[in-house]
Amino acid sequence: IKDCGVNWVILGHSERRHVFGESDELIGQKTAHALENGLGVIACIGEKLDEREGGITEKVVFAQT
């Protein structure tokens, strides 16, 4: 990907989490791999509507960091 001139990646987007089932653990592994290879990372974190309404926003976001 760096050979194509890419310097940054976006990881953890909600669509990847919910449509493709990417876990916090997998996103963490992808983040480490990107950083080890000199890429900048834009990390997407956040909660779903039901989590926000359930009052667990901090718990969910903390688990993603």
Image (cartoon, helix red, strand yellow):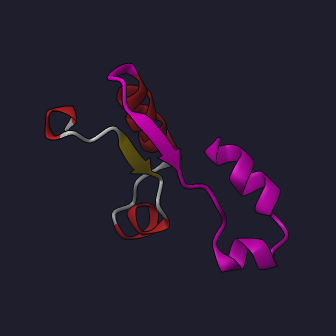
Residue at the spot 61% in from the left edge and 55% down from the top edge: 45
Q: Residue furthest right?
A: 55
Give the quarter of the image for residue 36. Answer: top left
Q: Is residue 30 magenta?
A: no
Residue 41 image offset from top left, x and y in percent: 46, 40
Quarter of the picture holding the N terminus: top left
Above or below — where is 42 with respect to 32?
below
Above or below — where is 28 with respect to 20?
above
Residue 18 in the figure: left or right of residue 65: left
Residue 24 image offset from top left, x and y in percent: 52, 46
Residue at the spot 44% in from the left edge and 68% down from the top edge: 18
Give the quarter of the image for residue 6. Answer: top left
Q: Is residue 37 magenta?
A: yes
Q: Residue furthest top?
A: 36
Residue 9 image offset from top left, x and y in percent: 37, 45
Above or below — where is 14 with respect to 49?
above
The region drawn magenta spans 36-65
